[in-house]
Amino acid sequence: MRVKRSGEGAKGRVEYGGGGGGRSASAPGSVAAPAPFGLAMEESEIRVLLDRLDAVSARLSVFPAERLIAEYRSILTDLLRRAMKGFSLRRDLRWRKTDRKMFVTIERAEAAMEELEDAFRREGDRSRAIALLEEIKGCLISLLL
């Protein structure tokens, strides 16, 4: 960095820089990363869906109804679809480390949903149903966040 003094002695104005026009130095041919608006929007939508899932699961734990189970399954399906979309994108980018873990987690969430529906149909396994709600939420969090 060059420092030029304009004026006499220490009372003058000090100018910094080499006349780069205010732009930072970057490697030739490099492209600035675009603002991650799409990523922030996707994350916001996921958080809204997870909040809805929490609200429905709280209502399910108090009063299990077929309508609530259907709503819960709908939200779960949407979240799993988003997870699979993100998974296919990462797979296209050659991130194959998480292939097996991702599919195992999705299968675990779907199996827990089936067991949850059975537990609510029996109406005697409320503690197991609540544990399954938490397991499904844990699977979704590990997939999406």
Image (cartoon, helix red, strand yellow):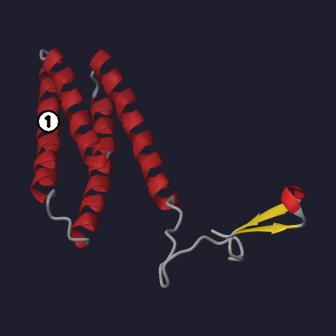
Residue 9 higher or lower than 125, as above or below: below
* Count of numbered tags: 1
Q: 8 or 71, which is in the foreground? A: 8
User: Which of the pair 38/113 is nearer the observer?
Assistant: 38
Classify the position of the C terminus by image quarter: top left
Q: Amino acid at mark 1?
A: Ala
Q: Residue at x 28, y 40 (%)?
A: 141
Q: Quick one: SS at disc 1?
A: helix
Q: Is residue 145 above or below residue 129?
A: below
Residue at image location 42% in from the left, 41% down from the top: 47
Q: Residue at x 90, y 64 (%)?
A: 8
Q: Residues within 10 Å of mark 1 (few under 14, many from 20)?
A: many
Residue beneath label 1, please? 112
Q: Quadrant of residue 97?
A: bottom left
Q: Position of residue 85 (x, y in %)?
A: 29, 61
Report x, y in % for residue 105. 15, 46
Residue sticking out furthest to the bottom: 29
101 with respect to 72 (left or right) = left
Q: Residue furthest front?
A: 9
Coordinates of residue 119 in the picture (x, y in percent): 13, 25
In the rendered structure, the answer to whether residue 111 lies left or right of residue 143 reads left
x and y percentages locating residue 56 in the rendered image: 36, 29
Q: Answer whether residue 123 is visible to the viewer in this image.
A: no
Q: Residue drawn 49% across and 53% down?
A: 41
Image height check: is 34 above or below 44? below
Q: Is residue 101 left or right of residue 13?
A: left
Quadrant where the N terminus is found in the figure: bottom right
Towards the viewer: 101 or 112: 101
Q: Is residue 25 visible?
A: yes
